[in-house]
Each structure stands twice: as C-alpha cells, then as structure tokens.
Amino acid sequence: MNTEGKKLVVYFSHTGENYNVGYIEEGNTHIIAQMISDATGADIWEIAPLKPYPVNYNECIDVAKKELNANDRPAIQGDIDIDEYDVIFLGYPNWWGEPPMCIYTFIEKHNWDGKTVIPFITHEGSGMGGTDKRIANSCKGANVLTGKGLAIQGKVAQEHRDVARSNVDSWLKGLGFTE
C-alpha cells in the first residue's frame, strides 16, 4: 500500500435525530472523517444525497430501509474526480449491515482500478458488520482493506471525541499512515 500517495477522505454522514445520540448538527461519520483528514493531510469530500434524508430518526430509517429493499441508487449532489488519488478512505454509517445506498451511487460513478480503499464506519453496536466486504465487491479493481477498517460507535464520536481521536490515531499508525 502506498501510504505516501495522494489521499482522499470521502464520507456520508447523517445529521438531525440519530439513534443513541439524539439530535446532532455534526454527523458521527463526519467527525471521524475530519479526524482522519487532519491526521493524514488527506483531502476531504462529503457525499450528500440530492434529496436529504429526513431529520426525524424514524422517518429517516423508513426512507433508508425502502432504498435498501429496492436496491436504490439515490442521486447525489456533485462529484469529485478520484483519478488523482491513490488512497481513498471511505466512510459511512452502518445501516442494517449495509452502507447507505448513496455510497453505492458514488462508488458506481467511478473507476477504482489501482486504488486502495480503506473503509471506516460509525455504528451503534454492530461494528463493521461485513460492510467492508460489500464495499470490496463494489469497488472493482481496488485493493479494499477488508478486515482492516475502522468502526467507531457514534456515541463515542459525539460524546467522547478524545477516545475517538485516540482510536483513529492508533488505527492510522497501525496502517502506516502516521508515526
């Protein structure tokens, strides 16, 4: 893996009412994405659905569950050219053992040949939940670091940022991105 190559952090994060943390203005995954970007000097880009998910938790999970069941690919706002990047940290919340469907919208827009993709997620008890393997199946041609991703509980990201940062720093050091 080329830890010296050009790096990008791409993530989706939900704000509003979230499970186990209440109403938040800065999403759990966004917090972790920013920590990774700050520690590695990576550029950062947020995947934003064209039609935002509802702020209300129950309404959000209803929409997200319908997208999942339909294998939908919701439109996203804008895009970023990933051609110039060697390493892409890909972040998302774990929703029922799947990344949100807008992650697949982003993935399917790009050529992943030769990229190193490193998943990181936020969750409320399910950990990585096999989502890294689903990402590996979708990022054709990429070296996806399955089994080496980072899973941080959303409550930790929101309420114990020093612990979250320590976990991020240890993870990045273990991967060879920091000393």
Image (cartoon, helix red, strand yellow):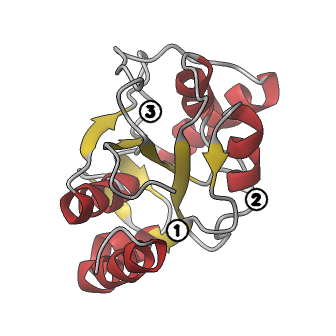
Q: Is residue 96 visible?
A: no
Residue 167 spot, x, y in % from top left: 39, 81
Mark 1 near mark 2, Cβ–Cβ under 8 Å? no
Q: Is residue 73 above or below residue 32?
A: above
Q: CA distance from mark 1 to mark 2?
A: 12 Å
Q: Position of residue 13 (x, y in %)?
A: 40, 45
The local secondary structure at tag 3 comes to loop
Query: For mark 3, what is the residue?
Result: 54
- Counting other residues with Cα less than 10 Å from the Cα at mark 3, is it few (<14), some (14-19), or many (20 or more)? some
Tell me if residue 76 comes above or below residue 97 in the rendering. Answer: above
Q: Which mark is residue 130?
A: 2
Q: Residue at x 31, y 43 (%)?
A: 6
Q: Residues within 10 Å of mark 2 (few under 14, many from 20)?
A: some
Q: Residue at 46% of width from left, 31% of height from top?
A: 53
> Which residue is denoted by mark 1 in the rendering?
150
Label 1 Cα neighbours within 10 Å, binned few <14 / some 14-19 / many ≥20: some
* Callout 1 amino acid: Leu
Which residue type does callout 2 highlight? Gly
Badge 1 element = strand
Tell whether 31 sits left or right of 152: left
In the rendered image, residue 141, in percent from the top left (x then y), is placed at 69, 32
Q: Which amino acid lies under the numbered mark 3 shown in the image of this protein?
A: Pro
> Residue at coordinates 62% horizontally, 20% vertically from top-left?
108
Residue in front for this viewpoint, 164 or 86: 86
Q: How far apart in space, not on screen, are marks 3 and 1 (Cα)?
A: 27 Å
Image quadrant where residue 86 sits? top left
| Occupied quadrant, residue 4 | bottom left
Tag 2 secondary structure = loop
Q: Earlier in the sequence, mark 1 or mark 2?
A: 2
